[in-house]
Image (spheres, helix red, strand yellow):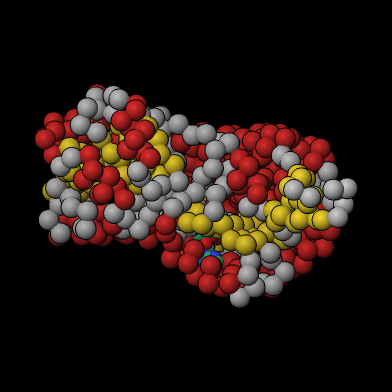
Amino acid sequence: MKIIDTIYLDGAFVTPHGDEMFDLFNPATEQVIGRVRLADAQDARDAIASAKRAFPAFSRTGRHERIDMLKRMHAAVVAREDALYEAITEEYGAPVSRGRWMAQHASSVLLEAAKVLQDYPFTRRIGIAEVVMQPLGVAGLITPWNSDAGFICGKLAAALAAGCTAVIKPSEMSAIQTRIVTEALHDAGLPPGVFNIVTGRGDTVGAEIASHPDVAKLSFTGSTAVGKSILRTAAETLKRVTLELGGKSPVVILDDANFDEAVPLAIQAGLMNSGQACIAGTRILVPRARLAEFEAHVKDALAQVRAGDPRDPLTSVGPMVSRKQWERVQRYIRVGIDEGARLIAGGEGRPDGVDAGWFVRPTVFSDVVNDMTIAREEIFGPVLSIIAYDDTPDAIRIANDTNYGLQAYVMSRDIDRARQVAAQIDAGRVLVNTLAHEPAAPFGGFKQSGIGREYGTFGLEAFLEPKAVLGVTGA
Ligand code: NAD
């Protein structure tokens, strides 16, 4: 049983003012594995004050000093990679390959930010003006549970690269992972107050960060509903806001696609991170004339997908993070059946042979029409919808007929055709015949998938404000 009874404030682990104890679970066993003492609004205010004190000196640090800090942070997180992997498996239930990727991703985002900082032009000349990119101030970073360490490190890396100081509010459900990351980042030896980590509830700690006048910038990853409330709250003090929200990503299978390649990719895109991924490809758009052939391939592919013990290297779908999430996914499966979609794999309940843990049967519906609930709402579990289309314009229309616009996938033998389709889809990223990630390219959503971009130069600039200085250029 792990007891986490401190928060990270002003460069030290301290007992929070908040005294609520919150249970932490292993989702594969439903057993309580730890307890965390949650921070409260007073702790959030203390953390903001600490970051505010640290800002003047930190914002004046030079590029090379900050690159050096990011590299130290990277090395410190690399040194904890095995412990982090263990925590990800135990507390989140990520299958082996995903867990390893997540543990490694947490350190790599720090190095990526250092690379961006290396060449970024903080000062440039535009006409007779000298334009300086200036750090915004204290950044509030609020993150979800579905890739805890990666989100903490990614947002912190961009904030610090820009010269901002930070207050981080991670999900209360990921406290063991957060603790390991915090210990690593502490070992990197940054000046006190440059980053503070206050694990607490969203409606107390999160709300305090979203409303506090001394926070200049908010970067939030989470649900669209909470993102909207944060934007409304932030409007009072006109904070700069980056929102990375939900998705209902289309996978457009063009009529020339090779199903031997496209189906495994589509299944992987849909079931990644056990379906708990904002970028999951959950609406699979298939040419009507090839629907039966596609379904047969999907059934074969699903028969190979193992859902269960995340420590089994053959498992690709682990448990849902919590009982609440498990019940939510079960409810959506029932809704799909009630609305007349046809189950071709999976269904309600746990996978065969599994009688404990928040496991879901990887589920695929066909005969889904795009106005059904399961095609419109983000389920955040391994539940996929196959939607038939008539021709390519119809596929593009369906792909864009959603409130979301985070990511899309296009599968075709003809890259030029796929590129033309990609050009017509409203999504922050479109992946053609691949599930690759480019850490230097912008990431973020169109429409209700969010506002702004993370990663690379775009992600750095989200923490900077341009200032034009005139009369100093000699022009
Ligand atoms: P959530 O919105 O419930 O919570 C996210 C974070 O916000 C948590 O730390 C939570 O405590 C906090 N929070 C809750 N209420 C708050 C409030 N009123 N004020 C301030 N903070 C508050 O989301 P979740 O269930 O933790 O995560 C799942 C969601 O995250 C999904 O919708 C998913 O699509 C989204 N997500 C998006 C991305 C992306 O990059 N676009 C990535 C991962 C997850």
Residue most extreme to the bottom:
236
Occupied quadrant, residue 289: top left
Q: Is residue 149 visible?
A: no
- From what the image shows, is residue 227 above or below residue 337? below
Residue most extreme to the front:
475
Q: Nearest the camera: 122 or 191?
A: 122
Q: Nearest the camera: 274 or 342?
A: 342
The x, y position of residue 103, in whole percent, is 56, 37
447 relative to 106 in the view: left or right: left
Occupied quadrant, residue 189: top right
The x, y position of residue 188, in whole percent, is 76, 42
Q: Residue at x 25, y 35 (%)?
A: 253
The x, y position of residue 40, in whole percent, is 63, 70
Q: Residue at x 72, y 65 (%)?
A: 48
The x, y position of residue 153, in whole percent, is 63, 45
Q: Is residue 210 visible?
A: yes
- From what the image shows, is residue 436 above or below residue 217? above
